[in-house]
Image (cartoon, grey):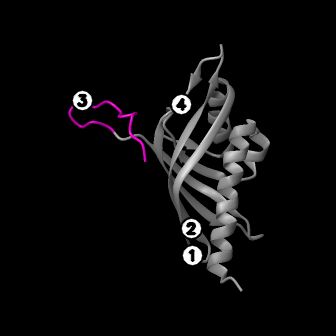
Amino acid sequence: MPTQRETDEAAIRRQIDRIVEGIHAKDLKALEQVYATDVVSFDVQPPLQHVGVEAKLKNWAEAFAFFEEVSYETRELTITAGDDVAFAHCFGRLSGTLGGGLTTAGMWVRATFCFRKSDDGDWLVAHDQVSVPFDVRTGMGVADLEP
């Protein structure tokens, strides 16, 4: 019989799978179900933070506008769950076919998800952060690294 922690970690893994599936389908309604209404997101796209689920979904809608087909993959996903908060981190890559048929392999980023357990027991993303390593000497992002 699984422990509560194992059950919670499996539920969080399913939520991350829903994010991946929602991105692939460009399904904003599906993505909305994964985020807390007051989510704070530090994404690679400006501004420095996106506050609230509407801002997070607007950010996704803007990203989806560039793609005819889009996919997202994760590697090395690690999840740690407590009683009512949890975090996960992984490497993620957004890729696909852009408008006009150009295919992009995307770039690997570092992603962190902070979850909060809702009153009804669902794990929702309360905070996420995506970052790109940068070269300190040039101040430029380093987009060719792979996990």
Q: Are marks 4 and 1 in contact (CB under 8 Å)?
A: no
Is any atom of residue 141 visible in this view?
Answer: yes
Q: Which mark is residue 105?
A: 4
Residue 62 in the image, given as x and y percentages of width and height: 64, 28
Q: Amino acid at mark 2?
A: Ala
Q: Is residue 139 magenta?
A: yes
Label pair 2/4, CB-CB below 8 angstroms = no
**Mark found first going from the N terminus, 4 or 3:** 4
Q: Report the number of numbered marks.
A: 4
Residue 84: percent from the left, percent from the top? 62, 73
Residue 119, label in figure: none
Which one is nearer the viewer's eye here, 40 or 104? 104
Is 86 situated left or right of 16 in this image? left
In this rendering, position of residue 30 left or right of residue 9: right
Q: Could you tell me the amino acid type at mark 1?
A: Gly
**Main secondary-structure element of the magenta-colored stretch:** loop
For label 3, the residue is 138
Q: Splitting the image into 4 quarters, where does residue 69 fall?
A: top right
Magenta extent:
134-147
For disc 4, the neighbor class at 10 Å (few under 14, some 14 to 19, many from 20) is: few
Q: Is residue 32 magenta?
A: no
Percent position of residue 136, x then y = 24, 37
Mark 3 or mark 1: whose residue is earlier in sequence: 1
The residue at which mark 2 appears reads as 86
**Which amino acid does the dot numbered 4 rest on?**
Ala
